[in-house]
Image (tube, helix red, strand yellow):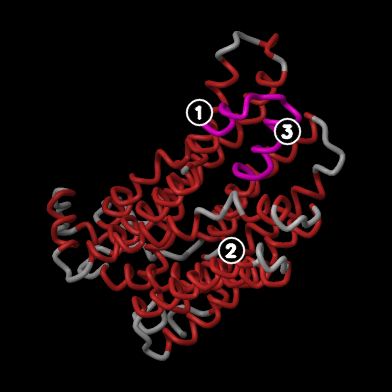
Amino acid sequence: TEELPLDRLLRLSLFQVSVGMAIVLLNGTLNRVMVLELDQPAWLVSVMVSLPLLFAPARALIGFRSDHHRSALGWRRVPYIWLGSIAQFGGLAIMPFALLVLWDPAMGPAWVGPAAAGLAFLLVGAGLHTTQTAGLALATDLANEENRPRVVALLYVMLLVGMIGSSFAFSFLLADFSPVRLIQVIQGAAAVTVVLNVVALWKQEARDPSRNRNVERPPFREAWRQLCRQGRATRLLLAVALGSAGFSMQDILLEPYGGEVLGLSVSATTGLTALFALGMLAAFAFASRQLSRGADPVRLAAYGALVGIFAFAAVIFAAPLASADLFRFGTFAIGLGGGLFAVGTLTAAMRLGKDGQAGLALGAWGAVQATATGLAIAA
């Protein structure tokens, strides 16, 4: 639109690319490197990777505070995106040195390495949750209600682009692994994070000091009650929790299932990630088209859950039928159903954010979704 041209929206969505890069680095690259190359106990690595989830429930509070933030320049979302960016950068900046102490305990007391690595993971997690919550709220502020579904779909696509692109980049850069190369890659990711987020923020939120006039921040509890009074907010968040948990439980099961039960090669199971991503991209495109035509986002999310039921059934029946193709179709359909469910529920949460409560509504959605996902994967 004239108010939000595509180039401006694409530039804003770069914060999602940085979030996707951080997710891949923490959950993928460092997860493997710490267990295999650095010879750390699997339980310790599991705790490290799960630390960012400790900050997930705070997303509702972050969104609420960004709704009512007062600054001399009249910014509401920008300070929180910047604070999140600095936290991401700080965590990634100290992470290489923490890994060095883990790699060679002689460099310091035994507790220093795990403590420093835990702090680094926690900072990155706090940063990405803060950046994503305030960034989604800013996108909601900039887009009119008619175009928000397409904005949501594009932001999700850019998150996926960040995850896929960074996974390829990390694979290429760490082909000849060494501790020094790992340090360089992590430090490079820290610098890229700041650059992407600064470019994303540049001249997105107008400076308007008049916003500070007669602005009083209500108590969080009262704001939460007001949000819950808006029709089906509580039921929506419960559905988000159950659906996110259901779709996320397959995260660490699909590839081992393909290898152990169906006898697929490492190369074949690795390709499942691409099928899953293609399913999600198809879901984003379909959801954007349907929602822009006035479709009910909750009904669309329900269709996603329904697709998921058939998708998991296909995965289950692939074993007795000894059909790798049925298994691949099921993987694609899980991505399709999960994408429809995510975009539908997020769009519904955006519509709950009325009367200056966009940050609180999106923060609540993000808190529930991230917490349910983490608990499901752990279970």
Q: Position of residue 370 (x, y in %)?
A: 42, 51
Earlier along the polypeptide chain: callout 3 or callout 2?
3
Q: Residues within 10 Å of mark 3 (few under 14, many from 20)?
A: some
Q: Quadrant of residue 269?
A: bottom right
**Mark-to-mark CA distance, 3 and 2:** 41 Å
Q: Position of residue 46 (x, y in %)?
A: 55, 34
Residue occupying the point 43% across, 87% down: 292
Q: Which residue is mark 2?
A: 316
Task: Describe the element under mark 3 as helix, strand or loop.
Answer: helix
Q: Position of residue 259 (x, y in %)?
A: 73, 52
Nearer to the camera, 217 or 123: 123
Residue occupying the point 68% across, 31% down: 35
Label number found at residue 119? 1
17 lies above or below 43: below
**Mark-to-mark CA distance, 1 and 2:** 40 Å
- Give the magenta range: 25-47
